[in-house]
Image: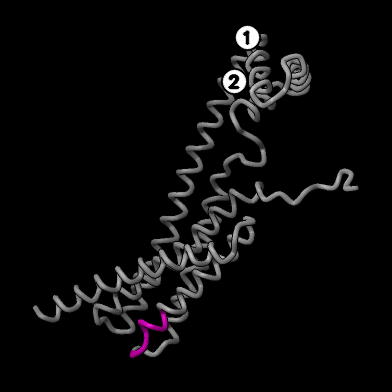
Amino acid sequence: MRGHQQEGHRGGRVGWLRASVLGANDGILSTASLILGVAAAHATHGSVMVAGVAGLVSGSISMAAGEYVSVHSQADTEKADLKLERAELKNDDEGEHGELTAIYVARGLVPALARQVAAQLMAHDALEAHARDELGISAALQAGPIQAALASAGSFVAGALMPLAVTALAPEAHLIPIVALTSLLFLAILGGLAAQAGGAGVAMGALRVTFWGALAMTVTAGVGALFGTATTGA
């Protein structure tokens, strides 16, 4: 018998997991692709490192800013919805009770029980009940702009440091294959860990990220090679 033991659901991880995985994945992929593109254009080892560091700095700032704006917009929308709902509860309590009742009926409760549940929940905390069941807003899933921005930027830097470290240590003659293979390995590990943390299939998660990573790096390296050939020819 489990009693009141809490179940290990993963829904509460969605916010930070999404931001962290996206940041780390983008850090590995964009930095590795940039390094491969510049290296394929016949740049020196020093120039490749400078490009990689520049990509790390600009990418982390971009990720933080983009995530902050995106999540802040979501938070603003949630606040506006809650403000409107608070006013509706004040002006039409009976109508709001009817809305909540209809929601519970649609979920499978008989009308009499739905009205009773709605009445009890509204007596306890009317705004919370409507926020959760009508608007889909809950404290566990509410947007946190600063946390999301920091998670994205930090994970991007952590991801970008992986191909950068390999670039610093790899011999220039074998830089491209070493960076490509190790970056794909990093992406596969990240995809597998993210899938496991989210309760999904590890192999499929790793395969999905690796496929798109390989495609992006191949295209970027090809563009770099064409640009380098054109520049050399000129």
User: In the image, which residues are magenta?
Assistant: 173-179
> Which residue type does callout 1 highlight?
Asp
> Mark 2 highlights which residue?
85
For marks 2 and 1, give the CA distance: 10 Å
Q: How many C-alpha atoms fall within 10 Å of the one at disc 1: few (<14), some, or many (≥20)?
A: few
Residue occupying the point 57% across, 41% down:
143
Which element type, helix, strand or loop, lies under badge 2?
A: helix
Residue occupying the point 87% across, 43% down:
4
Image x and y of residue 192, in percent: 57, 66
> Which residue type does callout 2 highlight?
Glu
Residue occupying the point 53% across, 26% down:
80
The mark found on residue 39 in the picture is none
Q: Is residue 175 magenta?
A: yes
The main secondary structure of the magenta stretch is helix
Q: How many C-alpha atoms fall within 10 Å of the one at disc 2: few (<14), some, or many (≥20)?
A: some
Q: How is the image coloured?
A: one colour
Decide: is 229 above or below 70: below
Image x and y of residue 204, in percent: 53, 63
Q: Nearer the viewer, residue 146 or 174?
A: 174
Asked whether the residues under the numbered discs 2 and 1 touch, taking CB atoms below 8 Å apart as contact, a structural biologist would say no
> Mark 1 highlights which residue?
92
Decide if residue 223 is on the left or right side of residue 193.
left
